[in-house]
Amino acid sequence: MKDLQKPVANLGKFQDAFVTASGQTRASVPLSDPETLWFNTGTLCNIECTNCYILSSPANDALVYLSEAEVQSYLSQIGERNWPIREIGFTGGEPFMNPGMIAMARAALERGFDVLILTNAMRPMMRKTVQAGLLALREAFGDKLTLRISVDHHCEALHDKERGAGSFAKTIQGMEWLRDNGVRMTVAGRTVWEESEAEARDGYAALFAAHGFAIDAHNPSQTVLFPEMDETVEVPEITSDCWGILGKSPDSVMCASSRMVVKRKGAKSPAVLACTLLPYAPEFEMGETLAEAERPVQLNHPHCAKFCVLGGASCSA
């Protein structure tokens, strides 16, 4: 497994949760409108991508499989805390590596939530038992279920450069199965490539048209393009004054509306994290319950600046 330690960068920055390196008050984000609760189903994946932010691979079990019972517990806590959650998201790793994925999705759907599953649509999703489960969920819940497919680039060569030779063709095969069986799809791509957003969206539009995928490439909620998350790049720390300078509100940042549940290898219980992007940063672990996760989040990481505040990205649909 790859080294989980942070690369050396931004020396002197992001050291104090409340004060920046220049001595200014660090920005924080209250949980103002919880809309999405994420579950990381485990870091095991059928492939190992070149730049996976969570270092998922066939060997990385740093985050172990969540169970249906554990998911049910947090779904109950949503009601107990009166959180206005509309969406339950499942991410990994590859969620369909987890044998309980269909049952966990059903548990959320039966409680009335929209469900979003992030997948590469490759072999784990294409197992007969998983296909049967997806068809049953589609029959019972229709478009309340969405699968967001990782298509790193609309060009096969660049996608395979990131995900391995032959991965593009396998993902397209999985998407064609979803298309033919009426399962709602969206796509997640990346902006690491040397092209404008307009060029990227036009490329995805051509890909979707060629395969008859009912996905709008120019709608950011249907085709999400994520900025690269590179901790070796120098980024500014976000101070409390930055909101006014940037003309942004703390409510626009992802941790104002979401939390993520993970289970670390060897842990007795799952934990709630402030951010889907920082599973290995202990300072972003908030406790074992949703009640403990209601406190504000200090923006004490390079991803907070580059991905969320300055990049304006969000993992939710």
Image: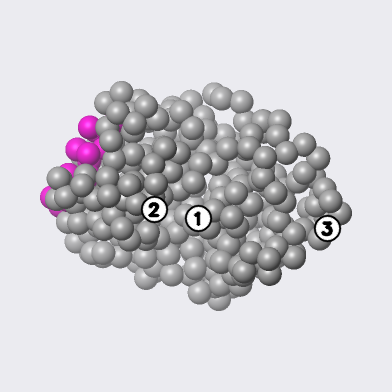
Q: Residue at x 43, y 64 (%)?
A: 87
Instruction: State yes or no: discs 2 and 1 in contact (Cβ < 8 Å).
Output: yes
Magenta span main SS: helix
Where's residue 239, x and y in %?
A: 75, 59
Q: CA distance from mark 1 to mark 3?
A: 25 Å
Q: Which residue is mark 3?
A: 24
Q: Write down the region rendered in magenta.
A: 167-181
Q: Is residue 282 visible?
A: yes
* Amino acid type at mark 1: Ala
Q: Under tag 1, what secondary structure? A: loop
Q: Position of residue 126 (x, y in %)?
A: 24, 38
Mark 1 or 3, nearer chain start: 3
- Residue matched to label 1: 313
Q: Element at badge 3?
A: loop
* Magenta segment includes 45: no
Q: Residues within 10 Å of mark 1 (few under 14, many from 20)?
A: some
User: Badge 2, how many Cα within 10 Å: few under 14, some, many 20+?
Assistant: many
